Amino acid sequence: MIRVGIVGVRRGSSFFALNHFDGVRVTAICDLQPEALIAAGEAHGIAADMRFADYAAMLDHVDAVVVGTPIEHHAAQSIAALEAGKHVLCEVTAAETSDQCRALVAAAERSAGVYMMAENYCYRRPVVLVREMARQGLFGELYYGEGEYVHNCRALRYHPDGSLTWRGEWRLRHTGVSYPTHSVGPLARIFDDRPVSVACGGSGSVCNPEFKHDDCNLALVRTARGGLWKIRVDNHSLRPHNMAFYQVQGTLGCWESSRGLGDQDVVWLKDRSSDPNRWEPLSALESEFLPAGYLHPPEEALRAGHGGGDWWELADFVAAVRGERPPAVDVHDAVRWTLVGIVSEQSLACGGSALPIEDPAEWRGAAQSAA
Ligand SMILES: NC(=O)c1ccc[n+]([C@@H]2O[C@H](COP(=O)([O-])OP(=O)(O)OC[C@H]3O[C@@H](n4cnc5c(N)ncnc54)[C@H](O)[C@@H]3O)[C@@H](O)[C@H]2O)c1
């Protein structure tokens, strides 16, 4: 039996779906708000003595944790669990600062526990399909990609009494594409590539001058294989909810995701399209290229969030904990994708210059040779 504890039981509560996996049970929860503990505990049958305000105390009673707290706690809570030999599934992003990234990588590399970042947008149905098509070469050589996360979060910035929530404070602490992983993660998976530099620009606080943060930030990312990605993160602009957008361009074809306004994902593939000027619906390729699990999902997957993607993320985590396969988003990828945001902030401070993104997989070697 893998005993799981969830810390931060708002977003974290969606991870009670782990109970659907044989041999896995959420047995403990932790939150600073007593009412949140009671609500989640009662809803999910968590024993009263397994509801903790003290995270360290909860760690003694579990084999794995889901970290669903505000971003500023992700690194410290992940590191504490890894140092105690526990497995970690952590919400995005992995850390708030470069120093936290380094400490997290070191802790994960030392630990007997598995670390995985819960980047659920990698599991979206179109992303999984396009990734498989890219793997089979249908797009040829991929050289350009776009990822946008456009989510008006103004309402989430303030408590009813007008004081700032953690999101409001966090946004004011960080400029740049500070929430990049929903955009970068899917592109990294489709391109099978990693970011190596980022240059960032900001719109200024135009439509929302009282909140000192760019309404919209754009980053240009170079990848290790020479690809170019445009990343947009916009949590301020006034517009209807229309969260994620992607496109990729290769030498043999391209994909544009749905804008979510009644349109659909479209592709054009040179070797399969009879008309060079006509997009085809991406869905027409599902039966040929979508992994079987997505084509014929279990009931539980259909009930999970984000179009069933959250289910496959949990399946990957459970398999990694059992040692069946490596974590799907390991600590190196988690930090690579997180660093796009952290370095984009430094780029803005340097007038938008392109700055390098280190590869965390090389940190251990560098530390050892320095020692
Ligand atoms: N992947 C996704 O699609 C997705 C969606 C929503 C949120 N998130 C992520 O989930 C995390 C939480 O977001 P949210 O919307 O649930 O925030 P929230 O503010 O609604 O809830 C955070 C919860 O954590 C608790 N908490 C805060 N500090 C704590 C601490 N030190 N120890 C224990 N509990 C603590 C709070 O009391 C609260 O119950 C964030 O990192 C966010 O980025 C991801």
Image (cartoon, grey):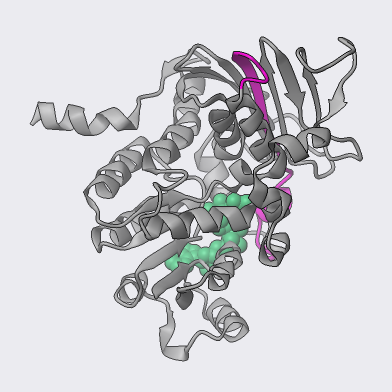
Q: Quadrant of residue 11?
A: bottom right
Q: Which residues are magenta?
A: 137-161
Left or right of 370, for residue 306: right
| Ligand 1 image position (quadrant) | bottom right
With respect to residue 348, does 184 lie above or below?
below
| Quadrant of the frame with the N terminus | bottom left
Q: Is residue 127 magenta?
A: no
Left or right of 23, for residue 371: left
Q: Is residue 144 magenta?
A: yes
Q: Residue at x 26, y 49 (%)?
A: 107
Numbered circles on residues, count = 0
Q: Residue at x 39, y 46 (%)?
A: 326
Q: In front: 283, or 161?
A: 283
With respect to residue 141, does 121 lie above or below?
below
Q: Quadrant of residue 269?
A: top right
Q: In front: 120, or 218?
A: 120
Q: Where is residue 313? Give x, y as percent.
A: 55, 53
Q: In front: 215, or 247?
A: 247
Is residue 258 in sight in this rendering?
Answer: no
